[in-house]
């Protein structure tokens, strides 16, 4: 008998303030047409008086409710974020105290836009080794706090929000294979050679402030398309599956052209791809659980369906997770 980790509940939260491309036209030299054509973004949510932890707590509460568990049954909390409320403590412990989760491992992981895939893979590993059995995994970001609002190359892209899942252990009979519910494979990579293509020009041990996002957009785009094509090919090969066995692609929402390129590599029609970039922008580690929760709640993603999720972000980092929901 082995153990597999499956998603028992999803939740998400978006701050109420919506910033449209028209609003941005009044702030920097840009146009709705440029932003939509180059990125697919029409509007995004921006947190005003809320922190990353505030948003994480709301998303987590919704995931706990859907899972039908109580907070005191959770025995691990992993938060993916690049924009924590403070240098320390971790956002994870703020979530723990707000929701009344008993003593357990609680920590943040930082892999920028790949953060949720990293956090989900970490939680999966803890569950498979038996160290945790019910883990709250969150992706939460307040990217607006590290945006340079005078840099039109980046300020039109990033946004705020949070998403969460509950990952639970399930006993698996030997030989169950890919038909069983749960995470089938996780794939994580980083290439530090790309660290200067997408970074923040500040930090605790350098400038002493949190800094702002700097990005070589064109270069990052090229790496994203290449690495994501490679990683989805690896997922297919390792699991010995054909793209038509995947019901849904839930990609990180950085750019509609990157998403379309990955779908094309998978020979997948865009109506099997969950897209939120038009309304959410790039919420970094929050984008995948936000998209997943939206599609679960509106009934597109159903129990028993196969889902592939992937992301590429600063670092450079990239990764993918294949699971049956
Ligand atoms: N409005 C109007 N013009 C603009 C804007 C804007 N908001 N931003 C840039 N431009 C101009 C540039 O100045 C440039 O003008 P020039 O030709 O006169 O020099 C022109 O538009 C083209 O700029 P590019 O940067 O070459 O445009 P590109 O087609 O590459 O699109 C974009 C830019 C959308 C940023 C794209 O490169 C992209 O999506 N890159 C990947 C982003 C990504 O995936 N990041 C990873 C995840 S994020 C994370 O990890 C935190």
Image: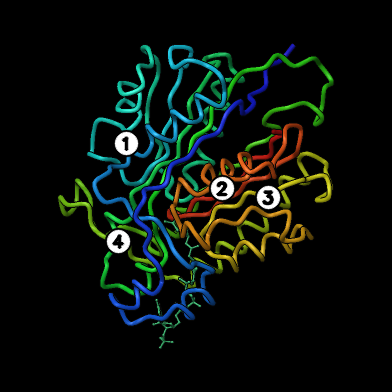
Residue beneath disc 3 = 249
Describe the element under mark 3 as helix, strand or loop. strand
> Which label number is shown at residue 53?
1
Marks 4 and 1 sit apart, C-alpha to C-alpha, by 18 Å
Q: Nearer the viewer, mark 4 or mark 1?
A: 1
Q: Nearer the viewer, residue 61 or 265?
A: 61
Disc 3 residue: CB within 8 Å of ligand 1? no
Q: Is residue 310 above or below residue 171?
A: below
Marks 3 and 2 sit apart, C-alpha to C-alpha, by 10 Å
Disc with the residue nearer the chain's start (4 vs 3): 4
Asked whether the residues under the numbered discs 4 and 3 touch, taking CB atoms below 8 Å apart as contact, a structural biologist would say no
> Which label number is shown at residue 127?
none
Residue drawn at x 51%, y 70% as measured from the top left: 39
Marks 3 and 1 sit apart, C-alpha to C-alpha, by 28 Å
> Which label number is shown at residue 291?
2
Residue beneath disc 4 = 147
Is residue 291 found left or right of 147 in the rendered image? right
Marks 1 and 2 sit apart, C-alpha to C-alpha, by 19 Å
Residue drawn at x 33%, y 49% as measured from the top left: 142
Asked whether the residues under the numbered discs 4 and 2 touch, taking CB atoms below 8 Å apart as contact, a structural biologist would say no
Marks 4 and 2 sit apart, C-alpha to C-alpha, by 22 Å
Q: Nearer the viewer, residue 104 or 63?
A: 63
């Amino acid at each position: 008998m082995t153990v597999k980790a499956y998603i028992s509940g999803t939740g998400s939260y978006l701050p109420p303030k919506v910033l449209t491309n028209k609003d941005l036209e009044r702030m920097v030299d840009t146009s709705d047409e440029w932003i939509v054509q180059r990125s697919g973004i029409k509007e995004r949510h921006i947190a005003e008086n809320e922190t990353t932890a505030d948003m994480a707590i709301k998303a987590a509460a919704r995931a706990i409710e859907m899972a039908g568990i109580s907070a005191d049954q959770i025995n691990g909390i992993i938060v993916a974020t690049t924009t924590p409320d403070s240098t320390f403590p971790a956002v994870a412990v703020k979530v723990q105290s707000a929701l009344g989760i008993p003593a357990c491992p609680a920590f943040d992981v930082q892999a920028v836009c790949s953060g949720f895939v990293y956090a989900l893979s970490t939680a999966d590993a803890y569950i498979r080794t038996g160290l945790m059995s019910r883990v709250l995994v969150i992706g939460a970001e307040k990217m607006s706090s590290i945006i340079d609002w005078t840099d039109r190359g980046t300020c039109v892209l990033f946004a705020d929000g949070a998403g969460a899942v509950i990952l639970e252990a399930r006993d698996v009979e030997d030989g169950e294979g890919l038909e069983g519910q749960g995470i089938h494979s996780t794939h994580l990579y980083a290439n530090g050679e790309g660290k200067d293509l997408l970074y923040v020009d500040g930090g605790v041990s350098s400038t002493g402030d949190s800094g702002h996002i700097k990005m070589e957009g064109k270069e990052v785009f090229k790496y994203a398309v290449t690495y994501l094509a490679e990683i989805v090919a690896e997922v297919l090969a390792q699991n010995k599956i054909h793209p038509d066995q995947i019901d849904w692609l839930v990609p990180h929402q950085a750019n509609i052209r990157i998403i379309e390129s990955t779908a094309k590599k998978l020979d997948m029609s865009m109506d099997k791809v969950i897209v939120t970039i038009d309304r959410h922008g790039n919420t970094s580690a929050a984008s995948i659980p936000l998209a997943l929760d939206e599609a679960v709640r509106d009934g597109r993603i159903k129990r028993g369906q196969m889902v592939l999720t992937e992301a590429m972000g600063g670092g450079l980092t990239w990764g993918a997770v294949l699971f049956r929901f």
